Image (spheres, grey):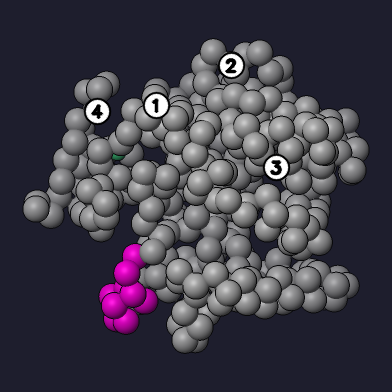
Amino acid sequence: MSATPSWQAADGCVHTGPLLQSVNGFDVVACEACGFSHTLPLPTPQELEHIYSHEYYTQEKPLYIERYLEDKAWWDEVYAERYERLEAELPAGRRRLLDIGSGPGLFLAAGRERGWNVMGVEPSERASSYSREVLKLDVRSMFLNEETAPTLGQFDVVNLGEVLEHLPDPAGMLRLVHGLLAPGGMLVALVPNDFNPFQRVLNESMGVAPWWVAPPHHLNYFDTDTLPRLVQRCGFEVRHVETTFPIDLFLLMGHNYIGNDTLGRQAHAMRKTLEMNLRAGGETGRALKSRLHRAFAGLGLGREVLAFARKIDDSPSPA
Ligand SMILES: [Zn+2]
């Protein structure tokens, strides 16, 4: 196998770069054309649509909604922190939010409780019907694309939580989001922080298989540099970048939760306890938590990258 695989997409673009990993017949390359790492080849939109409307929440993640509800107290704090940041960035009258890939709808429900006007888009039938029937939210069962986007209206915030890593054209999605935002509106993007230094140490020095490489569900592999760069290139000013807790730290401490659900839940519970205790620690605890997560990001560490960015008005639509 060549150390720099290359693949030509239907639009003629040649994707090529150093090979990072090969898993399940997919190569992950640090793509020079895109400026971030992704699999070669990229599946067609039709192949993906099948995976997400039929398989994802029923086969891939059977306990997804149940686990979400078990963790609700913690999610409420995680989401409160995100809304606090958005409320500091936007004037009080600007509270229209669209969540793309809204899952069971807890982020939307948290916003509604704070007085936000919220809407969701979620292709999974199971997750979107939970949002509508149980949480009474306005969530549409559909994929966001050039045909469906103009039917939704205009928003002050668009949230993309764990979406961009799944898409064959994440820049195309950011272009759609740019069009959905009112002038000066905010984008919130969360993606896994992959090939991070803890993972590389675990893989290179301890022989741990690259569990984070998961094609065809994860096509793109971002980090604390490449996510902000992509967002910027798509017409946004990056306002804030932080990462979530570096849960892979537990692996380095010998608590090997890979493929072990019980150990995984234990690690997650300890992380939740840490974060809840810091949040409960008044101004000191909250400020420390915030500085800690920015510092993790500065080291390239953390399980996910979270970026807040403002739409630059009149910026040319990215090609
Ligand atoms: Zn590429």
Q: Position of residue 291 (x, y in %)?
A: 68, 69
Which of the numbered marks, if any, corresponds to residue 9?
A: 4
Position of the C terminus, as image quadrant, is top left
Q: Amino acid at mark 4?
A: Ala
Check residue 45 in the rendering and tell me which mark sits there, or answer none: 1
Q: Please, what is the three-letter code of the amino acid marked with disc 3?
A: Pro
Residue that carries the numbered disc 2 in the rendered image? 148
Residue drawn at point x = 52 percent, y = 16 percent = 146
Query: Upstream in the sequence, badge 3 or badge 4?
Result: 4
Other-residue count near label 2 (Cα within 10 Å), few / some / many at <14 / 14–19 / ≥20? few
The answer to whether the residue labelled 3 contacts the one labelled 2, judged by CB atoms less than 8 Å apart, is: no
Up/down of 142 relative to 302, above or below = above
Label 1 vs label 2: CA separation? Answer: 15 Å
Q: Is 209 contained in the magenta span?
A: yes
Kindly state the secondary structure of the residue where label 4 is placed: loop
* Side (left or right) of 240 relative to 3: right
Instruction: Classify mark 1 as within 8 Å of ligand 1 or not, answering yes or no.
Output: no
Residue 175: x percent and y percent?
51, 26
